[in-house]
């Protein structure tokens, strides 16, 4: 195990060097120079493990070990290699590095799979440059069309195609792939929360990726002079909004079962120190592992909002986004649990509170996902850290699972 651990640390450290903000975390935006350096490193490591390396028209990277069955679907393992601005060294790369280690173990043990093993490194999962997120997996599966991909631009007006060409990538390469070419997808990710560390458990087998809904709430009142409008004559949009906002978190607490609710953005108009606010716009982000909990809280949220209508206050709640919870494949979950037991690694079931590429692939193929602990639950910041021992354990579990899924021919 120690050799794997050392190798993993080297990979993580190497990829962490490719940042636009040295000393202030990892900033590796898609199709940047840092992307190019990381990409070249990943491709070199794939080649060193005897994989056939290719890229698609989005810049996703594939390293393939052919199987003995002609045109058989691949067992894919991987994650993303882009970052948020000033993020950490583990969100994404931990999963790519674990996948590289699986390929290394296949090579070292001279394994001959019947189904191909494919290591994948995906672009723009975070959406930090072109928005939307999960671009690599959405592209592969056709959820993001070529036309929509071509029309995406960054904040400086640079298109995806221009940005790709600037670092020598070829946007005319094939983009989508037939789901029939995918037998399964496995992804390791850092938890990005505190649960595994607090339980002192090294592996979380992901049951489901939570459902996510976002609302934009607009509260309209009547502007007026802060000094001359009596208190009983006011229709203060901010007071109404703050009463609603103060009640919302309790709805998630009452629902329980890991349900979480966040009011993340609040805009006040006209935003003057001596003017009664006439309009407030705020967002609600609601997540839970089971759809019934999401729907229950939406209903209670609407009831809460309606109790504050009237007396000059008018409120509208508009749904911006609705993603159903995704239960991951039961057979693969059971396989990962079995391999954890066989490797004497303690594990527990866990839900993912964040979206991942695995969520997109789960509509097209059998998906399994492992989490490892995040120190202090921190992520998307320079302090993000996970233990390379834990990554090594996850790689070992994926290696054993991949042997089964690729139907390695025993000597």
Image (cartoon, rainbow, N blue to C red):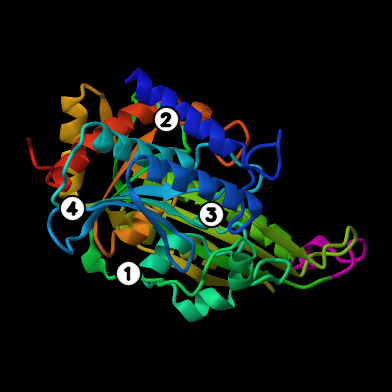
- Per the rendering, the mark at residue 80 is none
Q: CB under 8 Å between callouts 1 and 2?
A: no
Q: Which residue is mark 4?
A: 67
* Residue 146 part of the magenta segment: no
* Residue 228 part of the magenta segment: yes
Magenta stretch bounds: 224-235
| Disc 4 to disc 3, C-alpha distance | 32 Å
Mark 1 Cα shell of 10 Å, populated few (<14), some (14-19), many (≥20): few
Residue 378, visible in the rendered structure: no
Q: Nearer the viewer, mark 1 or mark 4?
A: 4
Residue 221 appears left or right of 275: left
Q: Quadrant of the N terminus?
A: top left
Q: Which residue is mark 3?
A: 126
Q: Which residue is mark 1?
A: 177
Q: Quadrant of residue 223?
A: bottom right
Q: Quadrant of residue 269?
A: bottom right
- Secondary structure, mark 3, is loop
Q: Nearer the viewer, mark 2 or mark 3?
A: 3
Q: Spot the residue most to the bottom.
A: 147
| Disc 2 to disc 3, C-alpha distance | 20 Å
């Amino acid at each position: 195990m120690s050799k794997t651990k050392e190798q993993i640390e080297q990979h993580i450290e190497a990829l962490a060097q490719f940042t636009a903000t040295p000393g202030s975390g990892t900033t590796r935006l898609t199709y940047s120079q840092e992307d190019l350096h990381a990409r070249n490193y990943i491709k070199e490591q794939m080649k060193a493990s005897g994989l056939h390396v290719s890229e698609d028209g989005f810049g996703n990277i594939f390293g393939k070990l052919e199987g003995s069955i002609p045109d058989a679907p691949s067992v894919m393992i991987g994650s993303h290699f882009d970052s948020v601005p000033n993020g950490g060294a583990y969100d994404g790369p931990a999963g790519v590095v674990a996948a590289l280690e699986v390929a290394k173990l296949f090579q070292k043990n001279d394994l001959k799979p019947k189904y191909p093993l494919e290591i994948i490194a995906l672009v723009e999962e975070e959406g930090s440059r072109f928005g939307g997120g999960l671009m690599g997996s959405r592209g592969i599966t056709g959820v993001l069309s070529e036309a929509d991909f071509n029309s995406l631009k960054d904040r400086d007006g640079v298109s995806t195609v221009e940005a790709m060409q600037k670092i020598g990538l070829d946007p005319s390469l094939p983009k989508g792939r037939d789901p029939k070419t995918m037998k399964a997808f496995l992804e390791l990710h850092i938890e990005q929360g505190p649960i595994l560390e607090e339980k002192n458990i090294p592996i979380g087998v992901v049951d489901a990726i939570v459902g996510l809904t976002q609302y934009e709430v607009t509260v309209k009142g009547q502007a007026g002079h802060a000094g001359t409008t009596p208190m009983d004559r006011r229709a203060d949009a901010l007071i109404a909004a703050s009463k609603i906002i103060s009640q919302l978190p309790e709805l998630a607490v009452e629902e329980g079962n890991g349900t979480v609710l966040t009011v993340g953005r609040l805009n006040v108009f006209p935003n003057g120190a001596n003017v009664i606010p006439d309009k407030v716009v705020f967002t609600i982000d609601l997540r839970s592992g089971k759809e019934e909990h999401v729907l229950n809280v939406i209903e209670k949220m609407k009831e809460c909002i309606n109790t504050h209508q009237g007396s000059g206050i008018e409120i509208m709640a508009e749904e911006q986004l609705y993603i159903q919870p995704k239960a991951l494949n039961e057979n693969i979950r059971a396989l990962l649990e079995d391999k954890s037991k066989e490797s004497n690694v303690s594990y527990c079931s866990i839900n993912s509170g964040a979206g991942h590429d695995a969520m997109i692939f789960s509509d097209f193929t059998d998906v399994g996902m492992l989490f490892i602990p995040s120190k202090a639950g921190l992520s998307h910041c320079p302090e993000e850290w996970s233990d390379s021992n834990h990554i090594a354990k996850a790689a070992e579990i994926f290696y054993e699972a991949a042997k089964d899924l690729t139907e390695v021919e025993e000597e």
